[in-house]
Image (cartoon, coloured by chain):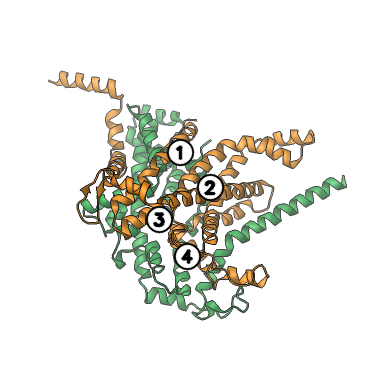
Chain colours: A orange, B green
Amino acid sequence: MDILLGKWLRKLRLTLGVEFALAYGLLFPLAVVLIGLLAYPIASAIGITLQDKKIGLPGKFIGLQNYYELLIDDPVFWLVVQNSVIFTVCSVTLKATFGMVMALVLNRPIAFRGFFRGLLLMPYAAPAVAVVLGWRWILDLMGVLNYILVNVGAIKLPVPWLAQFGTAMFSLVFVNAWRGIPFFGVTLLAGLQTIPADLYEAAEVDGASAWQLFWKITLPLIRPVLLVVTVLSVIWTFNDFSVVWLLTRGGPIHATEVFSTYTYKQGFELSNLGYGQAVSVIISPLLVLVILAVSPLMLKGERD
Amino acid sequence: MGSIRNNSLARKLFTYVVLFAFVVGALFPFYWIALTSLRTPSGVYVRERMLIPRNLTLENYRFVFTEQPTAMWFRNSTVLSLGSSTLSVIIGILAGYALVRLKFRGQRKMARAILFSYLLPSSLLFIPLFVLMHKLQMLNSLWGVLIAYQSFNVPFCTWLIMGYFQSIPMELEDAAMIDGCSRIGVLFRIILPLSTPGVVTAFIFAFTSAWNEFLYAIIMISSRHLMTLPTGLGSYVMGDVFLWGPLMASAVVMTAPPIILFMIAQRYVVSGMTLGAVKG
């Protein structure tokens, strides 16, 4: 009997690895989370979209009707697509540009670099809800931005930044970018610090200008880092909820409606869980593609 | 020679001007939030010398702690964030060690699954998680939220901790095992003490993201006394009238803990940002 058990155990070790028992034991809690809170919900998400499901009631199977309505009958959906793309592209571009400038400035020989890096990190470190409400007050019709702009003569009358078409989306992009710049700045700074100084010295001896140094040395060498940070930021910005919800709630009249707010509104304000989920499921292939594109870059770093 | 010196002086000046602009841009909203929180209800709207502090009062802080459930929300946020991040870090340590050091089938796939989960956005998950929690009858309970938070904090902590474990030389471990130390003993006596920075970083990030989380908390908690600070504050935005003074006072209360954590552990935080997002 013992011999049989020993044989069986050896066979298991051969196929699963020498330390399989300990490994699977240590991984058990992680597996519960990955399966119970990620894999299962994702799988059930697709099922939910095939139902007419209200909060608290069992769903009724209706096939692809939610998708049909969404793509054919719902003009708001296409507005949501457009808004999400504009919001994401503009915001990430701003973040990347200003984050790059922030990194370059912090990489210069300045006094108290750690202190300044800490100060500039604050928009990223502070809770989104708190600072976004702060911005809502700043951008208010009676707020300080209008006060300053009227006083310096840039505008004659206060502007309802969050309540009118055009400026509402612009304000959202601005606030989202404000929060995200430090992430670019700090990660790019870490990238800049790996570039050997003698590369710059050699190029300077050869008479290269600061502009050339940036385009010919800095940018090519920092490109891998920039790429990963940008893709991460695209994923996070595309799914931002709190900035949009707390500043405009998607308004005025869907002018700033994005995927997350539309999903939320359909699901929880109108109680159409199936329809709401269809909104986010329909974009998921795109997101999965983006994630699959970026993960090899991150895994490569992990193996080194 | 003189022109080169002028040039470098001009460059230096330019650097500090840009730096100054960044500091003002990053900090002005905080100044404004803090200043508003210290003003009287009517003082908030006074246009005269609006940017300068005067007639300051702590009345708004008294108001939010005595007339609004801010203290309760603060407690809920603290318990929830401490509890959920501790759990995530423990799961992350166990799994991270297995993934980095033990040999078994499916190692690579598991690492990939973790990264994928870490990148998976919450807007895709919140409805099915809501339905799941409804089935488990865990809606409107902080336990339910604590469990839901594992969905983003566990992959993140595992991913981060894996990175730190990898940087510890294998030889240390081999030596200890030759001396008769078990695998678990190695993890607790050698690996963990050496990767304290990594564990601290994971904890800070997990704590902060739980502290700041808004979407899951808003869909899962409906009772006012169970709300966290973000959803409690968010609930004031639903009305038409904004009491900016009290609102900004609550914002200050909510901002203080993560900012203090970040400031104390800035070195760790920066390494975590660069490791969690971009390694190499």
* Quadrant location of the N terminus of chain A in the rendered image: top left
- Marked residue nearer the N-terminal end (2 or 3): 2
Labelled pair 2, 1 in contact (Cβ < 8 Å): no
The answer as to whether the residues below labels 1 and 4 share one chain is yes
Discs 3/1, front: 3
Pointer 2 residue: A89
At label 4, the amino acid type is Leu
Marks 4 and 3, Cα distance to the nearest angstrom?
A: 17 Å
Marks 4 and 2, Cα distance to the nearest angstrom?
A: 23 Å
Q: Residue A261 in the image: state x and y as whole percent.
A: 40, 55
Q: Quadrant of residue A289?
A: top left
Q: Chain of mark 1?
A: A
Pointer 4 residue: A133
Pointer 3 residue: A261
Pointer 1 residue: A290
Residue B157 visible? The answer is no
The answer as to whether the residues below labels 2 and 1 share one chain is yes
Q: Chain of mark 3?
A: A
Relative to A161, residue A84 above or below: above
In the shown orientation, is residue A144 left or right of residue B113? right
